Image: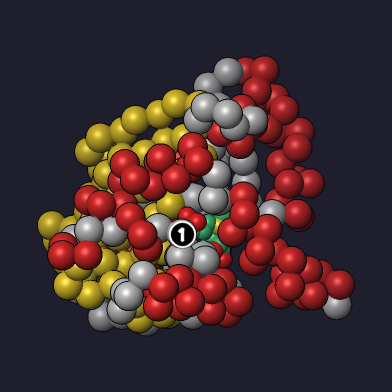
Amino acid sequence: MIKKAYEKYVLPKLLDVCCSTKPVSYQRAKVVPNASGNILEIGIGSGLNLPYYSKSKITKLYGLDPSEELCEMANKNASKHSMDVEMLISGAEEIELPSRTIDTVLITYTLCSIPSPNDALQEIKRVMKDDAIIIFCEHGKAPDENILKWQNRINPLWGKIAGGCNINRDIPNIINSAGLKINNLEQMYLPSTPKIVGYNYWGTASS
Ligand SMILES: C[S@@+](CC[C@H](N)C(=O)[O-])C[C@H]1O[C@@H](n2cnc3c(N)ncnc32)[C@H](O)[C@@H]1O
């Protein structure tokens, strides 16, 4: 019961605040404007990417998230930015969209939280057109042994507080293992961010 109340009343606001830092916003500005056509945002959360879309490039925007509370916050953000977003309240493991209909899949800071990222990526592949791209920006496994050691130690507790978020996932490996091809990949520690949660991977991938 306490867990349910935490997930309903505390977690959505906590995620909104943690994902609103300046360095993370800079990351959003690097990747989100590249989305175009029929776009599916996976784990839209509170809608923090919405201000960064190039509105003229959007044919249709779907926002998917299993959390009703976060979808509500995203809806409010969409109204604030005069954007039309169709919300799909579900996990990415089951997407209520026809096959081969999406041009761009946007995933930011969400592969860390999906319980089975491989299942989600297989379902994402199903809805992608043949020439579709995935634009991703995620935090994950640090390249330094010492940081990784702390990531591994803290991860179980972190997940309990942060809605199942994992701080030590090998993002490129998860994407490659799902049978996707990474077209370009950049990575670095975000400035002014604790290193255990600050190592970012971003780029694009396709089927
Ligand atoms: C750290 S938040 C990031 C939110 C947003 N993508 C952003 O960039 O601010 C992680 C998000 O993943 C969502 N999530 C958790 N499990 C998921 C699943 N199985 N499929 C899709 N999204 C999921 C959560 O509800 C939450 O909105």
User: Exactly how many numbered labels are in the figure?
Assistant: 1
* Residue underneath mark 1: 48
Residue displayed at 72% across by 28% down:
150
Please identify the quarter of the rendering in which residue 73 is found: bottom right
The answer as to whether callout 1 falls within 8 Å of ligand 1 is yes
Q: Amino acid at mark 1?
A: Leu
Mark 1 nearby-residue class (10 Å; few <14, some 14–19, many ≥20): some
Residue at 79 percent of width and 46 percent of height: 157
Residue 60 location, quadrant: bottom left
> Residue at (64%, 30%) from the top-left corner?
194
Relative depth, front residue between 126 and 78: 78
User: Is 196 or 164 nearer to us in this picture?
Assistant: 196
Q: Is residue 126 visible?
A: no
**In which quadrant of the rendered view does residue 204 lie?**
top left
Name of the residue lying farthest toward the right:
2
| Residue 75 % position (x, y) | 46, 78
Would residue 14 be seen by someone viewing this image from the given angle? yes
Closest to the observer, 74 or 38: 74
Q: Residue at x 49, y 37 (%)?
A: 23
Q: Is residue 184 positioned above or below 165 on the image?
A: above
**Residue 80 appears at what percent x and percent y?**
41, 73
- Whether residue 6 is situated above or below residue 52 in the rendered picture: below
Label 1 secondary element: loop
Q: Quadrant of the N terminus?
A: bottom right
In the image, taking residue 127 as reference, residue 24 lies left or right, namely: right
Where residue 111 appears, x then y in whole percent?
49, 52
Which x, y percent locates residue 167? 62, 41
